[in-house]
Amino acid sequence: MSIRPIAAQRQAMPTMEGAGVKLHRAFGFGDPSELDPFLLFDDFRNERPEDFIKGFPWHPHRGIETITYVLSGTVEHGDSLGNAGTLGDGDVQWMTAGSGILHQEMPKGNASGQMHGFQLWGNLPSSLKMTDPRYQDVSGREIPQVIDDDGTRVKVIVGSFWGRTGPVDGIAADPQYLDIFVPSGVKKTFKIDTYRKAFAYVFEGAGAFSDASAPSGVLLEKEVMGEEVNIRDLSGDRTLIRFGTGDEVTVQAGEEGVRFLLISGAPIEEPVAWHGPIVMNTREELVQAVQELQNGTFIKPAH
């Protein structure tokens, strides 16, 4: 067994998307090989409706899959294929854009005007770039949760973990998407297949992720619930941790516990040509997609 080293640790950065939605971006529009097959991760969390109510009006996607996970509030969605619905607390939507789709997402917030959710973009391999679009809408009630004896809770959204399998399937990136809470003072290890790229995103509390590459005695140390951990490893709200190679991740929860997403996927290792919500393999394919948007042939008939 080998602990995955921490390849990078950074705070999500505030940005604006759609018609003026304020959010925090953990990664995106950078080096696509860093977390291949994942391209972008946004945390859209707001306390004021004016910061998100204008939403994400009609826009195209091609060549990718998106997963939207709502923690609180609602998101109304619709698309060019006639699909429509509402995501609520705990609900998940995985959209395979494939050959192309136009859709909109309009967050509404909860009774207190709060909105919180995440969106992750996964790349599609060249063989599936032009596949038929499809949706998987999953109610939060369908997502299995496993509770360990020490109080650790894991929601299995995609993939298999601790004997349970998430309800979203058939995803090209073969991902594992877990929502994990580790209680105060608990130290926990989670297995990850060695061939996957992996990252964690902390969004409640704080914890220390063990780093196998940290030389002993070099970094300053701090007491966390009676255990010594490296200050570098202390991760609080809106922190992204990108891991290197290994088959396990270990975290020591702080005084308030720690809640984070642990996401991993199989690298595609193909060229990436990227223009906003359209992700292809070559510049020529991007040019063709833009031309099709302009001449009205972007949406393809189903095979």
Image: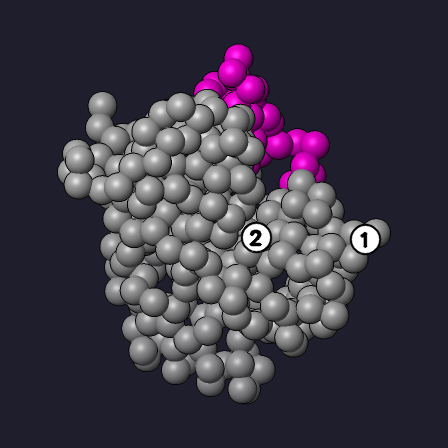
Query: Magenta stretch containing residue 155, yes or no?
Result: yes
Amino acid carrying mark 1 in the image: Ser
The N terminus lies in quadrant: top left
Q: Secondary structure at mark 1?
A: loop
In the rendered structure, which segment of residues is drawn in magenta? 138-167
Q: Quadrant of residue 281?
A: bottom left
Residue that carries the numbered disc 2 in the rendered image: 118
Residue that carries the numbered disc 1 in the rendered image: 112
Can residue 100 be spotted in the picture? no
Percent position (x, y) of residue 207? 44, 36
Percent position (x, y) of residue 187? 41, 24
Can residue 27 be spotted in the picture? yes
Q: Quick check: 66 left or right of 137?
A: left
Colour setting: one colour
Q: Quick check: 175 left or right of 297?
A: left
Percent position (x, y) of residue 210? 30, 34
x 62%, y 45%: residue: 92
Farthest-out residue, right: 111
Amino acid carrying mark 2 in the image: Phe
x 55%, y 56%: residue: 43
Query: Magenta stretch containing residue 256, yes or no?
Result: no
Q: How many marks?
A: 2
Farthest-out residue, top: 149
Q: Residues within 10 Å of mark 2 (few under 14, many from 20)?
A: some
Query: Label 2 vs label 1: CA separation?
Result: 19 Å
> Disc 2 vs disc 1: which is toward the camera?
1
